[in-house]
Image (cartoon, rainbow, N blue to C red):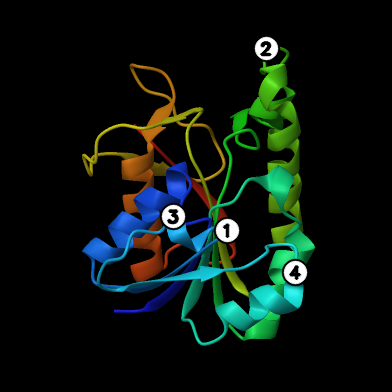
Amino acid sequence: MARIALIGATGNVGSRLLDELVSRGHQVTAIGRDPAKVAARPGVSAARADINDEAGLAAVLRGHDAVISAVRFLDSDPEVLLAAVRSAGVPRYLVVGGAASLLVAPGKRLLDQPDFPEAYKAEATRGAAFLDALRQVQDLDWTFLSPSAMFVPGERTGRFRLGKDELLTGEKGSSISYEDFAIAMVDELEKPAHSRQRFTVGY
């Protein structure tokens, strides 16, 4: 059992991560803008924090074994988040990443393909920049988990593949459910295999 601070605990991915963490017996501080949205249950305490307030966020993070960040890149600043984790003295930082920075061919990111949807480009660009920032960090044990291209609600099957920097594709394209993504993230939390690395999960 570990003490985990989960930033963005009420979002699409964050809520699945919260379920997965609790099901495995971890103690979770569920951090969001509105703690009232966090359902009361054993093993979970809700906390309010502004992800752009370094000192305030650090105060909430202090005393945890790891931080998992599940927030939109457009809503956050990697420097503020990293500074808060450092200030809090938390050794591990896991980030719900994006698929756009994954490679579809040597040296060619999904983000740079001509058919990449314009509606997602701003968020995807910020996500790629977040990964670039993490790759310069040597004083934290960080991990960035990228989903597949289609990242949607679905089933918790426990059947998926892991990769590194290349987009995973299968018979039905490139996809992963929020539920199975959560399994892969908590697996990494419990048995670290990608320290200071990005990896990806897909069917």
Which of pointers 3 and 4 indicates the residue nearer the eye?
A: 3
Picture quadrant where residue 170 is located: top left
* Mark 4 secondary-structure assignment: loop
Report which residue position mark 2 lands on.
115
The residue sitting at the top extreme is 115
- Of the 4 image quadrants, the one containing the C terminus is top left
Q: Nearer the viewer, mark 4 or mark 1?
A: 4
Compared across the picture, whether 173 is left or right of 79 comes to: left
**Residue occupying image coordinates x 24% and y 41%:** 156
In the rendered structure, which amino acid carries the disc numbered 4?
Asp
Q: Amino acid at mark 1?
A: Gln
Crowd tier of the residue under label 1, counting other residues whose Cα lies within 10 Å: few below 14, some 14–19, many 20 or above: some
* Nearest to the observer: residue 136 or residue 72: 72
Is tag 4's residue or tag 1's residue first in the polypeptide sequence?
Answer: 4
Calculate the distance from the C-alpha at mark 2 to the C-alpha at mark 4: 36 Å
- 58 versus 78 height, above or below: below
Q: Tell whether label 2 touches label 1 (CB within 8 Å).
A: no
Instruction: Please tell me whether residue 55 is drawn above or below residue 80 in the rendered image.
Output: below
Q: Name the residue at 70% across, 69% down.
A: 82
Q: Amino acid at mark 3?
A: Lys
Task: For the residues labelled 3 and 2, say whether their Cβ atoms are less than 8 Å apart.
Answer: no
Q: Nearer the viewer, residue 59 or 136?
A: 59
| N-term mark: 1 or 2 | 2
Return the residue at label 4: 53
Q: Confirm whether residue 136 shows in the render.
A: no
Measure the alpha-carbon separation of dots 3 and 1.
Answer: 32 Å
Q: Which residue is mark 3?
A: 37
Q: Amino acid at mark 2?
A: Asp
Query: Camera-side residue: 181 or 195?
Result: 181
Image mark for residue 197: 1
